[in-house]
Amino acid sequence: MASERDSDDGFVQVSASQESSEFISQVKRSDLLSTLAFSSPFGGVSLFLGNTRPFVGRCCYICAPQSWALLFHNHLALLGFRNAILVTETQTRYRGWLARRLCYFLFVVGRTVYPDVPFLEHRVINNARVQEVIMENLCNISDQKSHHNMRNVLGIFHQIQAIISPLLLRLTSWVLLKIFNWVFVNLQVHRGQIEMLRKAREKYDGPFVFLPLHKSRLDYLLVTFVLFCHSIRVPYFTCGEDVQLPFLRPLLRKLGGIFTPRDSGDHLFQVVLNSYIEELLNEQQSLTVYLKDPVSCSVRSSLTGLVWLAWVFDAFQNRLIPDAVLIPVGVSYDRIVEEHYLEQMDYVENEGIHLCTSAIPLQKILLPYVLGYSTDSVYYEKSQDWLLNNDELTQLSKHHRALVADLGRHMLYTASCCSAVMSTTIMACLLFHKHRQGILLSTLAKDFCWLMNEVLARHFDVGFSGKLLDIVLHALFLLGECVILRSCPLNNLIVIPKTTRKAVEKLSFYSNSILPVFIGEAVAACALNSILREVAKNMVDFDSNAEVAISQEELICKTVQLCQLLSTETLLLPLFPRFPPQQSVLYLNLLQPCRSVYQFSQEAVDKLMYCEILIMEENENKQPACDTWQKQFGKELTWKVMDDFDDSESDADETVWKCYFKLGQTQESHTFYLFLCSLLQPVLKAYETAAGLLHKLDFPIEESQCVLKMLQLLHAQGEEQHESATFSIANSAIKTFRELGVFKEEPGTKGPLLKLGETFQEPDNLLKLQWYIQQFCD
């Protein structure tokens, strides 16, 4: 577990190659685009070379400093990308006309396939936990029942057993080569990250655990295919009931797919499955665990993925494996291949994961600010004790369950940060957040280049390269259902986003992938917006040209408040749990979280300075506020000036100099500020609208029904709420209100019921809640 390593910024794909190329050629041949519109360098040259991309995929330097220093070398960043589906005779040992015709076949035959595990039936049956469960069921029961229990164990084992057939693996990879070349333009893999995988295999004696985000059901075959093409041991992988095609299930089972039925809550089934996973890990077999539900816009860990991760952790705790290499995998698509992904996103999340209140619940941290009086409690950390409330994890202590849940969150954060930003993401973000009324194609292309450079500057990679005009037209083609193209008298095109519910939801879905890039600046920008609104409200004769001094302390406080209000899925803070001192020596570097909310807020405010949205203001004594040479420190410090050895504490009574900011005056900084504020508006507007609709709910009500009812109410608000009316946002709002104390639980026949708390039964307090959220909206 100590060896965390991040892999693959993106197996990058773009789809519909032939149709996209025809669309681009058709637009170029038409007279709609003038050469003058793209006479600038943006339209004629490549955006960048492959080797200039930022190298992403390194592990967390706080949690895994040994892996950070051991597995990376500067030359890996210069290896560049490789198109995994571009196979020629040069990738084989043969040359000539026949080799060119049979290059796919020769390529898959030349790949290394590692031997499968031996038959594990007897080892699973004789596992101590399986035998213990059988003996518990056999107490005071006849021998006939004993044979019945043994047949149950064998039936469960044959139901979950998976194999990796070398012949079928080669045949499937040959077929996938043809299919992927027909579906995708290319499939980019970073050679440096593949080398890091090989280097990790040499350094660490333990199984590899791949942790993809599961953005598409195609990931089941894609991860296996990429690893096979690079002669890396292909992993066993988890499969759920989302694979419905009858012919696909037997195929995946012989490629390493382990299927778990939806009603797999039987204790004997879970014990047999756990034992089977332990035996696979003991054989040094790799494993792929999907920590997120397929095609879900929420980044919250799925219950099934966390359970499998807990089994890996349990095997390590019981010393069945010496170590495990955790590899978050970022897979990025230009377009999701599932046609009905928007409908698939609306499901009720598994209640096996829940947030338990601790010594510092959100109600005590943020409720005083909501009701109009401040307190220092906002700087405390919000409870993040995610627990796995499942019977199959009873072998893990409460502390270890929380540890596994936080570990899963950290892996999700890392996989999100190493996922490439695709062209459709940038295009959808511009159309959804910046150009809702339409824009000229030439101006849109320049904004596309600007946003791409902002992404690269924050050490995130992008999944495209080439001429700017071709990339822009390709992205517009893939988002064709969401935009309208019209000609204009200037021999240009006008791109207008559609306002239908389906188009708005699709643009919102694709633009959400860019939020991890700007999440810090976006939170700080919304906090700054709250302060500016308060200043404008309190000033009678407000001059738009007047400079406003903004206190750094107040801005950080507002940023912390917004961080506490937003859900953990939105912020994706890489918190890591505290390990007890008696754990392995390799755990000593993991005693503190990666980043606290206060640290996150400080960094977010600093980023606004780097963007020149804020400029450091000098204090009234004409001394720079950042000059610490003459600062006076508090009396809690143990040192004083050399010539001051008396017991006087007069220096502690002096006022500490404070830092102030003024707003940047450039048009670029103002435009970027508005863009950052818009990124969180769907979430904040949904929270605000949900707070105003609480009086329409029929209490008491189950939480799942409360979420669905709130989603219906958000849909009924009209077109302006389409981007906010998603299940994940409605679910996030209800859970935040519950933590904030808006709801109070009471026992019910089928489970806990929600009703309004005593504080919020007063309409005035509900209005204060709505006003509090509204201050962060634009």
Image (cartoon, rainbow, N blue to C red):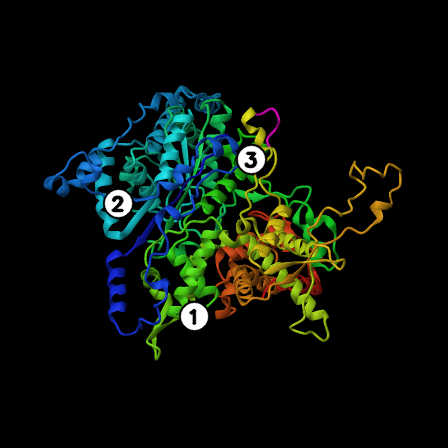
Is residue 737 in view from this perspective?
A: yes
Q: Disc 2 marks which amino acid?
A: Ile
Q: Toward the viewer: 333 or 632?
A: 632
Identify the mark nearer the N-term, 1 or 3: 3
For the record, the magenta segment spans: 579-584
Query: Is residue 583 one of those drawn in magenta?
Result: yes
Q: Toward the viewer: 327 or 256?
A: 327
Q: Is residue 446 left or right of residue 531?
A: left
**Residue plotted at (48% across, 34% down):** 68
Q: Nearer the viewer, mark 2 or mark 3?
A: 2
Q: Are marks 2 and 1 in contact (CB under 8 Å)?
A: no
What is the spatial separation of the Cα atoms under label 1 and label 3, in whole angstroms? 44 Å
Q: Toward the viewer: 661 or 60?
A: 661
Q: Quadrant of residue 368?
A: bottom right
Identify the mark nearer the N-term, 2 or 3: 2
Query: Is residue 689 one of those drawn in magenta?
Result: no
Q: Which residue is mark 2?
A: 85
In the rendered image, residue 276, in percent from the top left (x then y), is placed at 39, 28
Q: Are marks 1 and 3 in contact (CB under 8 Å)?
A: no
Residue 403, numbered label = 3
In the rendered image, residue 250, in percent from the top left (x then y), is placed at 27, 38
Query: Label 2 neighbourhood size at 10 Å, few (<14), some (14-19), many (20+)?
Result: many
Q: Which residue is mark 1?
A: 499
Is residue 347 in view from this perspective?
A: no
